[in-house]
Image: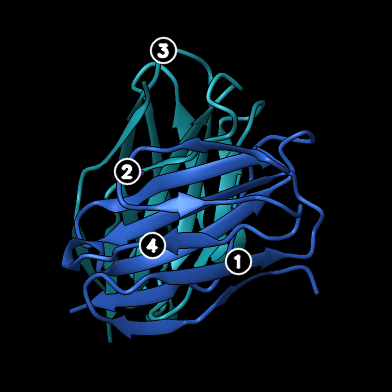
Chain colours: A blue, B cyan
Amino acid sequence: EAQVTQNPRYLITVTGKKLTVTCSQNMNHEYMSWYRQDPGLGLRQIYYSMNVEVTDKGDVPEGYKVSRKEKRNFPLILESPSPNQTSLYFCASSAYRVGPYEQYFGPGTRLTVT
Amino acid sequence: AQSVTQLDSQVPVFEEAPVELRCNYSSSVSVYLFWYVQYPNQGLQLLLKYLSGSTLVKGINGFEAEFNKSQTSFHLRKPSVHISDTAEYFCAVSDDGTSYGKLTFGQGTILTVHP
């Protein structure tokens, strides 16, 4: 089954404790992206990657890091989480080279930073 | 830069009534337009998309949307809603390639269908 998976689905942590949210897709997609969803703001892009070793900032990259060492994986790293990063996070992927940009979303990770 | 505005944050409606969720966008280039649905505690699912061609697009679950280039709108409609349509709906736009497939989302519209 074609899918995007994220782990963990729920995470409660404390300020400053480094964490990683994993994202994996089995569709051989080149393009992967991270979004955060906040009430009244919709989804905003954090980082995206057009292929292995190619990443770039989205609209709200501060406080986040990403890496793309393998085509299927695109982890999101919060090196020093703060309460304003409490949010619902979604990973997405698409076959960019085929186009046109229909993105497939993971189930989401709800992060709470206390 | 592109932007999306969903004109209603919440839309309450009774079961079997028609509904329209409004979406306006701005972009300096040609765009692709999408509607996604998010059911409670779930991820986003593509409802329908406009890429080119006919301006009336049909999607899953009986939804349809009309692309109006002159009014830069992409409103979502359903002639008769069900309780199961209760969800949050997001309009999104992607341009023709200059921003590498980035989706810009609207703020979302919560559709609540009452019995």
> Mark 3 sits on what residue?
B28
Indicate which disc, 1 or 2, sits on the residue closer to the N terminus: 1
Chain to which mark 4 belongs: A
Q: Position of residue B29 (x, y in %)?
A: 48, 14
Q: Amino acid at mark 3?
A: Ser
Indicate which disc, 2 or 4, sits on the residue closer to the N terminus: 2
Above or below, A35 relative to B38 = above
Q: Position of residue B63 (x, y in %)?
A: 51, 57
Above or below, A96 relative to A68 = above
> Mark 4 sits on what residue?
A78
Above or below, B51 relative to B30 = below
Helix, strand or loop under label 1 = strand
Count neighbours of disc 2 (C-alpha within 10 A) and say few if under 14, some if 14 to 19, many if 20 or more: few
Give the spatial CA distance, label 3 vs label 4: 34 Å
Helix, strand or loop under label 4 = strand
> Mark 2 sits on what residue?
A60
- In depth, the one of B3 and A74 nearer the eye is A74
**Left or right of B69: which side holds B59?**
right
Q: Are marks 2 and 4 on the same chain?
A: yes
Q: Amino acid at mark 4?
A: Leu
Q: Amino acid at mark 2?
A: Val
Q: Are marks 1 and 2 on the same chain?
A: yes
Viewer-side label of 2, 4: 4
Q: Position of residue B41 (x, y in %)?
A: 40, 81
